Amino acid sequence: MADLQAELAGVRAELRGTVRGEVGFDVTSRALTTMDASNYRRVPLGVVAPRDADDVAATLAACRAHGVPVVARGGGTSIAGQATGTGVVLDFTRHMDGLVSLDPGSRTAVVQPGLILDRLQQAAAPHGLRFGPDPSTHSRCTLGGMIGNNSCGSHSVAWGTTADSVSALSVTTARGDSLRLGRDWAGAPEGLRPLVDGESARLRTGFPDLPRRISGYALDALLPENGADVARSFCGSEGTLGIVTEAVVRLVEAPRARALAVLGYADESAAAEAAAGLLAHGPLTVEGMAADLVRSTADLPRGAAWLFVETGGDTAAEARTRAETIVRAADVLDSLVVTDPSGQRALWRIREDASGTATRMPDGSEAWPGWEDCAVPPAQLGAYLRDFRGLLGAHGLRGTPYGHFGDGCIHVRIDFDLLTEAGIARFRGFSEELAELVTAHGGSLSGEHGDGQARAELLPRMYGAEMVTLFERAKGVWDPDDLLNPGMLVRPAPLDTNLRFSVLPREPVDVVFGYPADGGDFSAAVRRCVGVAKCRTPEAAGASVMCPSFRATGEEEHSTRGRARLLHEMLAGELVTDGWRSTEVRDALDLCLSCKGCRTDCPVGVDMATYKAEFLHHHYEGRRRPAAHYAMGWLPRWLRLVARTRAAWLVNSLASVRPLAAVAKRLGGIAAEREIPRVAGTTFTRAWQRGAREGATTPGRGRVFLWPDTFTEHLSPSVGLAAVRVLEAAGLDVLPIPPGKPVCCGLTYVSTGQLDRARAVMRGTLDAMSALLEGAPQVVVLEPSCAAALRTDLPELLPDDPRAARLSAAVLTFAEALERLAADWTPPRIDRPAVGQTHCHQHAILGDTPDRRLREAAGLTGELAGGCCGLAGNFGFEKGHYEVSATCAEEQLLPSVRQAPEDAVILADGFSCRTQLEQLAGVRGRHLAEVLAEALEGEDK
């Protein structure tokens, strides 16, 4: 052990002395890279983020001197385990992530390995160009990772694999040689050509002829009739031969217009049988999926399985004509042709999210990769799928295939039991039999994601022992010391070892939340993160929210996936050894805004806001908490005290004196940059009771109770008064929650992890409302975060109290109340553009469809921004969070307001959103109720 520690210290010291980039041998750096998106886990010694090729060479030299393996890592979305390792991980996403140049004339680009694919696509688009391959992880996968895995994507029927798009590669070998790989043996290491010349007969006959053959080394690309293309042969080598430091890639002309034909079939076999016949029409894509993977079929044509067939053209009409030709040629139950780009994007999101949604079976049970992307000749796909289904049944397993039907490549997550010995034995037996089945159909064990540890052990069944021995000899030519990603492709680790779940506790972890979607098991909740890394998307797309802190910092530690990895390691106890007391986990969760965006935007529904609250509860149990937890976590209590003593004027006066405010902020753990919001002189309830209901129309449509949330009651009573005005104008009888013990959703206690206090507050609320809840009331909640807390946190913290479920079901948002209870009411016409941001919790928990319809009915035009305002309740007020908070606001919210027309209505239903707008932009945002109430006042004049 002492020798190991000395060796570790030696390589760490040498790396820090020779590498200009970051060198991280700390617990957090290592924990973040123990896993990729596969079933496997390895704990690295450290992580290096090189700044350039010299740093790569220095890292290799130090690791070679100390006998430490090296693993290259891009976005960490590999599904076969090849982005994990026990040595030093090279992380290219921090510094070597640039687009060096783009030449529209030659249709080429020079890229660094850490460049995200979408960045290249954005740069190429103005020139009418694009990179052909486009995996579903295009918003976060890197070009280096794509080269390592020879990635493909949905457009491979038109533009092939990454290997088809690579012109030249700059590579550093394990022994420090800098090579420039290309055709005609360019850059070939010594000994490679004699090896190929001596085995040319085997290479000409030993590889299956199919478009998605990714398994093994592509040594046949070195044959003279194939151009002796060393760069092409290197693609798909999974970081085992050399480290790519730069690449010249070819671009293709992007169609000026596209159409998407969605073809409905009775089942997946029918769709698979039809796919190959459509290739003659020159489609850009032929993708397939079944109903099991679709959250809602409302936007899809009739059927139980679908083909997504994309066509291109110089005009929308030409693209549509080609799509309609394909529809006529296909034998379908139903079809849909979409030419609108936004409609196409919405449909494609259904397909792209399948890699995440497939990790849960329809009954909620877990499903895993491992046989994620086998490929067979397209004409064999229907027969293969039938045999595949039979094999699943024989082993008592379930899975839903989807993927690249036009290329015969199938993705599938299977409900393997990877937690018990019997389940793991079944996993191995099934894998061995499926390898035989794929080979019998003339297929490849991998059709896109590489072999890694998941399939490399079974390569002899596909290629035979002699070819696999040839792969080992080729590896020896490139990397004679076996320094690069050992255990992958050749001399692999067994496929049933290093499983990521083997380190997790087998007994349930004692937790506070109910975790109903995970059977009450916190470990199962953490297992939800499979690593597809949608949370690492550097730019928010459309209305999406996840993950604002990652987009603000660019650090894996502050992504949903990164936090899930640290929680996984906390439960494992091997690397993170102090459990709930872990400072590493605490620090990673510190910048989580609890926006709950991941609960909806993550394809597998990771709910990091809940995990954070759970962790903080245990972390600070029996210990002194940060001052902000008492200052802002107990905000309802303090504001009720101010109201009870009628001291709002005093609080506001003291807050207006800068020295006093500074002291208060320092004592309360509040960021110095923040202004303390003013407390209303009269609470909403008091103002309402004093006659704010005068002039209301005669109610006739029903009765609703208006929830006096803390923010409306004490900080924004105008919102409550406006809501009463509008709801009564719509003919609803609006009543206060019956007086008695104060009611509260417990939000501020939950967000600061004070869960015992939160449950006590919630129980008090239920006690106060017991009689009311017996009558199935309709409860309108104006503050989105409070409504979300009542909808989700309340029943999940008090799962055994039936009153919690009743109150949760009774909650309506302002727009929901009008839509459900006053459907025939016509709101006043405003006829102005609207800008602002959909509240995070509205997006993630409540849904905003009724709000959209209400805005449309009132003539409020335009789309609200996505993302997060960055204030997020207590988060943006806490000391140390101001910079991230402001960065989040600058992503979408503030630009949308600055660019708004002069007559635009600034909408912000959440108190946090309104406060952020006021403090950072000097703009007053308004709740939709306020806007409608003002319009009603105008009608009355």
Image: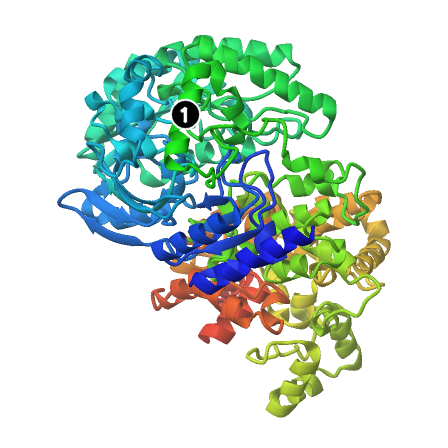
Residue bearing mark 1: 471
Q: How many marks?
A: 1
Q: Of all residues shown, which one is farthest toward the left?
A: 105
Give the vertical position of 201 relative to 562 (above or below): above
Amino acid type shown at disc 1: Phe
Q: Position of residue 223 (x, y in %)?
A: 25, 22
The colour scheme of the drawn protein is: rainbow
Give the vertical position of 909 relative to 299 (above or below): below
The residue positioned 41% from the left and 31% from the top of the image is 475
State the SS at label 1.
helix
In the figure, residue 784 lies in which quadrant?
bottom right
Give the vertical position of 518 relative to 75 (above or below): above
Callout 1: few (<14), some (14-19), or many (20+) C-alpha neighbours within 10 Å? some
Residue 411 versus residue 684: which sits nearer the camera?
Answer: 411
The residue positioned 47% from the left and 66% from the top of the image is 887
Residue 816 versus residue 745: which sits nearer the camera?
Answer: 745
Q: Is residue 776 visible?
A: no
Q: Position of residue 600 (x, y in %)?
A: 56, 44
In the figure, residue 324 lies in which quadrant?
top left
Q: Position of residue 381 (x, y in %)?
A: 42, 13
Residue 199 versus residue 831: which sits nearer the camera?
Answer: 199
Give the vertical position of 682 relative to 18 (above or below): below
The residue positioned 67% from the left and 80% from the top of the image is 681
Residue 581 versus residue 528: which sits nearer the camera?
Answer: 581
* Side of 904 relative to 529 (left or right): left
Q: Is residue 308 visible?
A: yes
Q: Position of residue 884 (x, y in %)?
A: 52, 66
